[in-house]
Image (cartoon, helix red, strand yellow):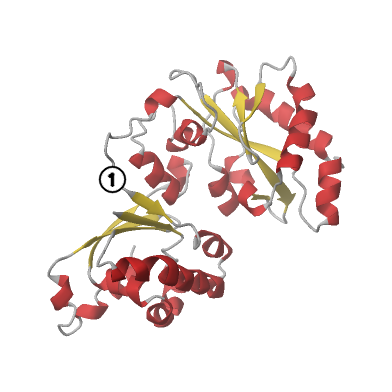
Amino acid sequence: MHIVLPGALPDPEAARALLPHLHEAAPTFTGWLARGRARLRTVEPAASGCTAYEQWQLERAGFKPDPQQNLSAGLGPLWASGGGLAPDQPIWLAELVHMAPTQSSTAMLASHALHITPDQSVALFESAQTLFEGTGFQLHHDSDERWRIGVPASCAFNGASPALVAATSVNDWWPQQEAARPWRRLFNEIQMLWYGHPANAARANQGLPPINGLWLFGGARPEQLQTPASPGEARRYEALQAPFMAQDWGGWLAALAELEAQVFLPLQQQDVQPVLVLAGRSELATLEPRILARWTQWLPGGRNTWSKWWLYRN
């Protein structure tokens, strides 16, 4: 069994501050760290266009990018929820987002931070449909937070996942290619249409930021996903991700304590020690149980060996 924990690898400075509190918050988790053989890998979000956790998902799904694609292209077919998709059809998704200018760039909130209701999603979708007519783009409702977009072949470009853009800057990923000009034009029209939209007026009354944009990403084909027949069980727990991104370390420890009570301790009581996959901003750590570690952890220094890579990883 694999337990996958996005947001479980804080940056070294935060890791040093959290270290004295880890055992108190999650003794089972720290015991697994002490008894695990760690394999660390640095990833490159600037090249892949996705977060470390998303890269793990794509690798597990067996995604093979074409030479002109970055890794994030595979998120289109990986996340599309609609059925009946042709294996050779490029799948593009557009996530409902909030964008706001800052002093030096533009920041973005991805859909998971916006609390979008089904009614809001449908209302915005219906209003946007008229803008798509005659543009060569087709609009399909895929979920409340993401829509599927039919994109003309001439408009293909490399994008980035909404989660990565939200963690960095819109300016870093805004498509500047000539091929993306038709989408940029349509995006601007959508922003103007949704300014003052009744759905956003209702959100303002609730103290919520407006939904004022669509972030386009994906572009790979379903046939590029080659999931192994028996990849093994992997349970994903994303409770650490939001406080990790917000650098809310008190909230991060509280979420870790909840995972201890609800997930880690019950597994320990069943004498199960899973393979741990921990994801940070640009790193993945895989910890496999070591049989000998159950007694070697009591040797001098053995119990705290894991803290060395936790604190000083490159």
Q: Toward which corner of the image does residue 187 lie, by quadrant?
A: top right
Residue 212 showing in the rendered view: no
Rendered location of residue 231, percent (x, y): 28, 41
Q: In this picture, is 79 found above or below 237?
A: above
| Image: 205 above or below 191 | below
- Nearer-the-camera pick, 84 or 53: 84
Q: Is residue 264 visible?
A: yes
Mark 1: which amino acid? Gly
Task: Tell me which residue sits at (52%, 25%) in the image.
Answer: 83
Q: Which quadrant is the N terminus positioned in?
A: bottom left
Q: Badge 1 is on which residue?
A: 232
Is 211 displayed left or right of 23 in the figure? right
| Whole-percent x, y for residue 260 in the image | 41, 71
Q: Is residue 127 left or right of residue 42?
A: right
Q: Nearer the viewer, residue 135 or 228?
A: 228
Residue positioned 40% across, 65% down in the render: 263
